[in-house]
Amino acid sequence: MKFYYTEDFKKKYKKLPQPIKKNTGKQLKLLLSDFKHPSLNIKKMQDPRNIWEGRINRSYRFTFQIQNNTYVLRNIGTHDILKKP
């Protein structure tokens, strides 16, 4: 698997505090190596576009889609992003 970063994801990632960026890198490495790792808490969202959510820490999440052999990273931020994945 590989990553594709949407423009929205890139913009929001740049605005994150440095410790959250560090945790994001750690969690994305886990996603590549073990999709079912407990700390990721991966869940399929109730969205017709087949969007998934993953956990960075207690307060921050990221959303993504799976297309062929690629994780398309869509959004990142606090729980509020789950309203508009």
Image (tube, rainbow, N blue to C red):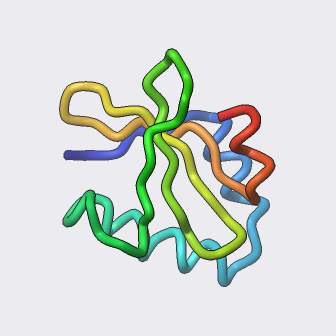
Q: Residue at x 62, y 58 (%)?
A: 61
13 vs 54, left or right, is right
Q: Is residue 49 above or below residue 41?
A: above
Where residue 62 sits: x, y (%)? 57, 52
**Who's the residue at 80% across and 49% down the image?**
80
**Residue 82 in the image: x percent, y percent?**
69, 43
In this image, 47 relative to 19: left or right? Answer: left
Identify the residue at horizontal 54%, vertical 78% (top origin).
Answer: 23
Q: Quadrant of residue 75?
A: top right
Q: Quadrant of residue 14?
A: bottom right
Please state if 75 lies on the left or on the right of 71 as rendered.
right
Residue 32: x %, y % from top left: 25, 59
23, 85: nearer the viewer? 85
Q: Residue furthest top?
A: 48
- What residue do we see at 72% from left, 56% from top? 77
Query: Which residue occupies the foreground of this view, 20 or 83?
Result: 83
Q: Foreground residue, 24 or 53?
A: 53
Q: Position of residue 7 (x, y in %)?
A: 62, 34
Which quarter of the image is occupied by the C terminus?
Answer: top right
Location of residue 1 with respect to 32 vertically, above or below: above
Number of numbered discs visible in the structure rendering: 0
- The residue furthest front is 46
Residue 43, compared with residue 47, is above or below; it is: below
